[in-house]
Image (cartoon, grey):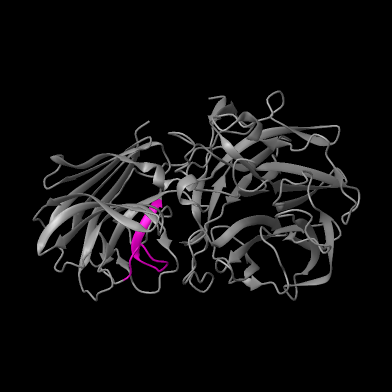
Amino acid sequence: MDTFKNPILPGFYPDPSICRVGNDYYLVTSSFEYFPGVPIFHSRDLVNWCQIGHVLDRPSQLNLDETPCSKGIYAPTIRYHKGLFYLITTFVVSKTGARKNFYVTATDPKGPWSDPYWLDDAPGIDPSLFFDDDGKVYFMANRIPPNGQQYEKHMEIYLQQLDLDTKQLIGPKISLWDGALKQIHAQEGPHLYKIRGMYYLIIAEGGTGFTHSVTIARSEELTGPYEVCKTNPILTHRHLGRDAPIVNVGHADIVQTQTGEWWMVCLGSRPYGGEFSNLGRETFLVPFIWEDGWPVVNPGKGIIEEELTRPNLTLHSWSSLPACDHFDSKKLNDQWNFIRTPRDQIYSLTERAGHLRLKVRAQVITKEVNPSFIGRRQQHVEFAVRTVMDFYPEEDSESAGLVLLQNCDFQIRMEYTRMNDRAVIRLLKRVAGEDQTWSIQEVETKRMFLKIEGHGQSYNFYYALEPEEWHVLYENVDGRILSTEVAGGFTGSYIGMYASSNGRESQNVADFDYFEYVSLS
């Protein structure tokens, strides 16, 4: 085919950063409170991507204990220099606490990556690295301007040299640019490039929502002054209105192909059922050219389109992951995540062959802890999930099942439990921190099939005691509570398996024989 479909990474994959090494491309995205952190992808044609692991896959690299929802790992940047990969990012520790910048390195992007090198006195978020021609390396991020903010959320991009020997910043902090769109706010996400002898600084402005955008400035000298592009923003969708199929466009990184083309990766959202983005912020790809020394994104259109002409690269497809995970491996596949850093042994793939065993633990998914939850991103507007669970609640406190998760306070749980000494399956919808019971049906079994179907913002929940003999638990549940527009934060919807004894001690387990996720569109 001569065209490709956007997004190139559907579902919650925001803040993309990209680099090329020969004929190979590597891309990373934010991961917030989920563990392992920073998924990393590989491509040879910029369109087909294969996840090759996570950058932060060890507790020694990433301590997410008590990290609030939508905090944690923000906006990583990946770069390659002289045989070494560099990944730099921000760890937002708490709602009001420190924002710590660090980087890790690897000779192989599949890992292992080093433990973090924490940078002292490195304020701001969304850090990036730039390797200049003279061998010097520079760190950049955003900060409050030294002379104070002239308007709300007014920030500037600053630069400081990084000593790779001491792994610390040295020399003065140099102000580079405080953005092109005065009064728009939130200058962040800087990336610096040297192209045809000029320094180009690309940043994000306008926040992460509807007014998000990409702007650019250039200079003959690293430290400026930076000339502002008169056609800024070079990419945004805010002028298209809130009914546009792709909104919230911004936070870009660029790459030149070995055939000489220039491409940009950026984030955007695809709302559905109104202005509701259950899938979160996704990764999109768009071409650009240079005209009079400035980028022109998607010439003649100026926006991201859902279908675009492919890059001039040899098509390279990867073997697709099976729709159904039978848990036959001794290691979880890369699409699975935990909430925060797992400290206990919350699961096993070996205690019962061919099953994922979840420990029934006291931790609950409604608090900022590490519950017995293993989930994956919702990636489609129309989808279906199936699993079969071997579990019997021995106490009223014990429950297990499936969860559609936005955060601690906004979620939908289909769980098998006990109530008043009766085994029941129930549907709970949690809105703004309060559980609402939508359905309860008495069921006595030790093996249960579970199914969830998403049809736009309408979600249907089913259970069965025998294969394909489905009973309706509840249909047409309003799924808009799973959107960032309702729940807030920066993450997209997850769906996964969950077990808890709700604050009580338990030795029980829930075994899942398989987990199937398919697109229905």
Residue found at x 10% / y 53%: 443
Front residue of 437/115: it is 437
Question: What percent of the width, then of the height, locates residue 484?
Answer: 48, 47
Residue found at x 85% / y 36%: 293
Most frequent secondary structure within the magenta stretch: loop
Residue found at x 21% / y 74%: 507
Q: In the rendered view, does 343 fall on the left or right side of 93?
A: left
Which image quadrant is residue 143 in?
A: bottom right
Question: What percent of the width, then of the height, locates residue 475?
Answer: 25, 39
Whether residue 73 is visible to the viewer of this picture, yes or no, is yes
Residue found at x 41% / y 36%: 381
Could you tell me which quadrant the C terminus lies in? top left
Whether residue 45 is visible to the viewer of this picture, yes or no, is no
* Residue 457 position (above or below residue 356): above
* Residue 408 position (above or below residue 14): below
Question: What percent of the width, then of the height, locates residue 308?
Answer: 59, 27
Which image quadrant is residue 415 in?
A: bottom left
Question: What percent of the width, then of the height, locates residue 210?
Answer: 60, 40
- Residue bounds of the magenta highlight: 363-376
Q: Is residue 497 magenta?
A: no
Which image quadrant is residue 461 in?
A: top left
Q: In the rendered view, does 297 fall on the left or right side of 4?
A: right
Q: In the rendered view, does 121 fall on the left or right side of 229?
A: left
Q: Is residue 368 magenta?
A: yes
Q: In the rendered view, does 68 fall on the left or right side of 508?
A: right
**Badge count:** 0
